[in-house]
Image (cartoon, rainbow, N blue to C red):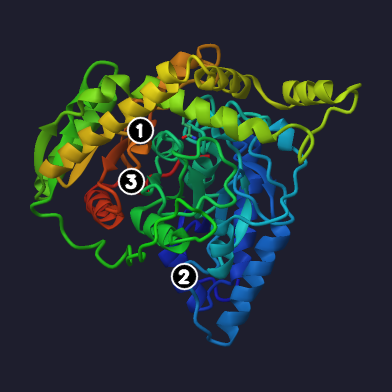
């Protein structure tokens, strides 16, 4: 390290602090990447946040940053800041597994748009983060590469499916990360691991190169240890992409510009259905305390009903499984990935490849999804689910005529014991009750740390906004964060 003026544990610094040190040449980008790998070596045996490390490309990016610093050339805001990327985003010439055996040796021939954007922004990708297979799950136990663990208590799950991305940030293995969120997979692990996680508006971030789970629900988003870093990361990855036909063609605002303005007079609606039965009392207390904090910050609070909440889980799981069964048809042993080598004929090759390549949860979803789409059942299940989805969307439209943002817990509980729900898929699905309507309605949602339970496990507060209200949501989250100190606490691992 050049002068060693930056003090304290580097692994828990914010991107702003690290950028200052980089520009003052107190530390080099190469040393920052070194720090990440040192930390991974120190803790990742216990956490399993990474499926693979991408040292060569990370150091190459760092070298370019250091070159630019040497000649005092302009640097994008997150240049040199180590990031972890969920392993369902393709990177050219590198391993992309989606947490599945069927892709365990898959080297992608192209890069996802978000990866290209990270490259343009000179953000070193230090590795691919662990996830539930094809992003299906709420605990990261469905990974074919073993479960990831919660850094606050390694007997607990980190949440899922972007568990590795949340753990990497919470444990200081990377400064920021990318996750994907189909029904809560960014916000749930963010809440269980005590970090910030945002699911942007559907279409704000390109899905090109994201291995599809449920295409009408999937969205990539940032995870970070504070709101400002989440805003900067969102800035780096957002924007229109001609390669994704669902991408929104609207300019990207400056997400950090208005972050620090106050929120006096902001109207926040508390979703009444999400503070009813089924929500753990310690979570409820933390949310009630957060509501008081928002009042102190000058927000106007009112109760809002989203009446179709009771149909949310069933609607989501019909839509998500139907789309998954169709998206996963491509994994047939022919085009890419794993192929059974002992089959005698084509049909046997297909069936053996899929039987051996997919895990139990993925198979369950392919079967249920195929059933829901089959002729005779399509109208009763898939079409009906899409109709209820419209009703849910209308509930939100109505709510946003009365309030600017909505508030709820991010999850009904804190992190649960590893193995405690693996035999009971339904109880696992219930973990998504607070998050999945946001995806059904295409809205942005963010989870921010809002407390700890009596066992020291983090609790997450969710804010939901209308389409493309990311700026406002980030400002509301930032104001809350600055008035509390939950985000300054780190797990002792
Ligand atoms: N837990 C939900 C599911 O298993 C959400 C997953 C996700 O958002 N990727 O479908």
Q: Which residue is mark 1?
A: 435
x and y percentages locating residue 90 in the rendered image: 64, 50
From the top left corner, tell me how far across and down residue 184 is, in percent.
41, 35
Label 3 crowd bin: few (<14), some (14–19), many (20+), radius 10 Å: many
- Residues marked 1 and 2 touching at CB (< 8 Å): no
| Rendered location of residue 393, percent (x, y) | 27, 35
According to the picture, the residue beneath numbered tag 3 turns out to be 444
Of residues 367 and 67, the one drawn nearer to the viewer in this rendering: 367
Q: Is mark 1 within 8 Å of ligand 1?
A: yes
Q: Is mark 3 within 8 Å of ligand 1?
A: no
Q: Residue at x 68, y 65 (%)?
A: 59
- CA distance separating discs 1 and 2: 33 Å
- The residue singled out by tag 2 in the image is 19
One can see residue 453 in this view: no
Q: Are marks 3 and 1 in contact (CB under 8 Å)?
A: no
Residue 390: image location, x then y, percent: 30, 32
Mark 3 or mark 1, earlier in chain:
1
């Amino acid at each position: 390290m050049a002068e060693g003026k930056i003090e304290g544990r580097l692994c828990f610094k914010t991107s702003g602090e690290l950028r200052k040190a980089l520009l003052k040449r107190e530390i080099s980008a190469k040393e920052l990447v070194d720090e990440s790998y040192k930390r991974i070596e120190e803790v990742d045996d216990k956490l399993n946040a990474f499926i693979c490390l991408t040292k060569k490309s990370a150091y190459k990016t760092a070298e370019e940053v250091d070159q630019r610093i040497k000649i005092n050339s302009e640097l994008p805001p997150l240049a040199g800041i180590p990031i972890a990327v969920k392993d369902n985003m393709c990177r050219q010439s590198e391993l992309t597994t989606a947490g599945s055996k069927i892709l365990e040796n898959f080297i992608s021939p192209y890069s996802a748009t978000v990866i290209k954007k990270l490259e343009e922004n000179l953000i070193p990708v230090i590795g691919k983060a662990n996830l539930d297979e094809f992003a299906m799950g709420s605990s990261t136990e469905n990974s074919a590469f073993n479960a990831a663990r919660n850094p606050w208590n390694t007997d607990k799950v980190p949440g899922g499916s972007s568990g590795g991305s949340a753990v990497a940030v919470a444990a200081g293995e990377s400064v920021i990360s990318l996750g994907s969120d189909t029904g809560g997979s960014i916000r749930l692990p963010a809440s269980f691991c005590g970090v910030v996680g945002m699911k942007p508006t559907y279409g704000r971030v390109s899905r090109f190169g994201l291995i599809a789970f449920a295409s009408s629900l999937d969205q990539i988003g940032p995870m970070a240890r504070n709101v400002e870093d989440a805003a900067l990361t969102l800035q780096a990855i957002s924007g229109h992409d001609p390669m994704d036909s669902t991408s929104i063609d609207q300019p990207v605002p400056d997400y950090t510009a208005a972050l620090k303005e106050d929120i006096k007079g902001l109207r926040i609606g508390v979703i009444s259905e999400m503070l009813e039965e089924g929500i753990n009392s310690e979570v409820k207390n933390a949310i009630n305390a957060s509501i008081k904090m928002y009042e102190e910050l000058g927000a106007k609070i009112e109760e809002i009903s989203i009446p179709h909440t009771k149909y949310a889980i069933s609607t989501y799981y019909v839509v998500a499984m139907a789309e998954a069964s169709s998206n996963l048809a491509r994994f047939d042993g022919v085009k890419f990935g794993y192929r059974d080598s002992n089959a005698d004929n084509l049909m046997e090759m297909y069936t053996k490849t899929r039987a051996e390549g997919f895990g139990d949860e993925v198979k369950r979803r392919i079967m249920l999804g195929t059933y829901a789409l089959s002729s005779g059942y399509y109208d009763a299940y898939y079409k009906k689910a899409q109709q209820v989805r419209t009703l849910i969307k209308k509930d939100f439209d109505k709510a946003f005529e009365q309030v600017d943002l909505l508030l709820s817990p991010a999850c009904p509980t804190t992190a649960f014991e590893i193995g405690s729900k693996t035999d009971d898929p339904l109880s696992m699905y219930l973990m998504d009750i607070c998050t999945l309507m946001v995806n059904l309605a295409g809205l942005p949602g963010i989870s921010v740390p809002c407390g700890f339970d009596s066992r020291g496990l983090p609790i997450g507060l969710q804010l939901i906004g209308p389409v493309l209200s990311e700026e406002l949501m980030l400002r509301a989250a930032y104001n809350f964060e600055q008035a509390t100190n939950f985000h300054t606490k780190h797990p002792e691992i």
